[in-house]
Image (tube, helix red, strand yellow):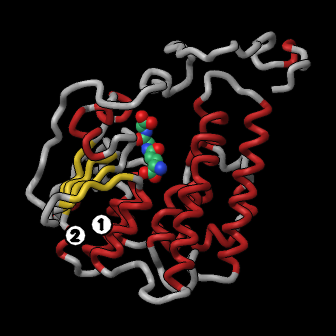
Amino acid sequence: MTQDADPQNNQPAGYVPPKVWTYDSENGGEWASINRPTSGAREDKPLPVGKHPLQLYSLGTPNGQKVTIMLEELLAAGHSGAEYDAWYIGIGDGDQFGSGFVDINPNSKIPALMDHSTATPTRLFESGSILFYLAEKFGAFLPPTQPARAEAMNWLMWQMGSAPFLGGGFGHFYAYAPFKMQYPIDRYTMETKRQLHVLDTQLANHEFVAGNDYSIADMAIWPWYGKIVIGTSYNAQEFLNVSEYANIKRWADQIADRSAVKRGEIVNLKGDDKLRERHSAADFDALVD
Ligand SMILES: N[C@@H](CCC(=O)N[C@@H](CS)C(=O)NCC(=O)O)C(=O)O
């Protein structure tokens, strides 16, 4: 902090950080009620377990959609071992702080996956780790040889490192914060547009993000950066002037058209045309058209 800065220029005006920060549950914003400065289970709550080897505990946010898209792509490619039960985790209601969920993900964030097909059940958290695990397990959507494999991992990790600036930075301050502050909005808008330019430049010369093949990198990046260009994420399309990113739009439209993506993106969401839980392929047939 600049020690001699005039507190009247602070936002809110006059705010001076205390010597030691303390937790204020009333600090406002859309997610204030669930956030705390400590981790761990807040209640004893076992998770349900269905009949399939893969048990997913998630919500249809971009981080959740990455995994349901991958699972639907695996099934569409004939990997019947990828059958899964997808259970709804209401993060606004604090389901991620139940003891069963925390046993799988001590970080209390969706998505979390259990693979019961291994000798000892395997727990998985962090969407990038889940995508990589599934790609290795089924030998799919990750090029088997170098340098193509490394390139796909480069872009998968790019997404994992970049999206917090888009979601936690731009999305938070532009859409969710209790009031608008120019400094963080300017800072994160610039970074978001820089990232969109990185991706648009890559897609100018490559059909898919990591080259010629559709991979887990595309599945990770599309729900965040594809949807901000062709969807309604944060209602920010005009503000970000997304029409500048024609290559992202070309790629995002192509991915959106895949039937596995159309299935994966509606899992663990509420609504007539969505699937709150998914337990078999037939669940999609029962949806209202
Ligand atoms: N890096 C994590 C991020 C997961 C994440 O941020 N999940 C959010 C929803 S998109 C969540 O569960 N938030 C609940 C909370 O923060 O309590 C991943 O990619 O899996």
Element under label 2?
A: helix
Is 223 on the left-hand or right-hand side of 249?
left
> Looking at the picture, how far across and down is residue 93, in whole percent?
33, 28
Q: Which mark is residue 71?
A: 1
Q: Is mark 2 within 8 Å of ligand 1?
A: no
Residue placed furthest toward the bottom: 145
Query: Disc 1 versus disc 2: distance between alpha carbons?
Result: 6 Å
Residue drawn at point x = 55 percent, y = 54 percent: 231
Residue placed furthest toward the front: 19
> Looking at the picture, how far across and down is residue 92, in whole percent?
38, 30
Picture layout, residue 227 above or below residue 46: below
Between 132 and 242, the one nearer to me in the picture? 132
> Looking at the picture, how far across and down is residue 112, in whole percent?
31, 50
Element under label 1?
A: helix
Residue 145 in sight: yes
> Looking at the picture, how far across and down is residue 67, in whole percent?
36, 60
Q: Which mark is residue 82?
A: 2
Ligand 1 occupies quarter: top left
Image quadrant assignment for residue 96: top left
Earlier residue among tags 1 and 2 = 1
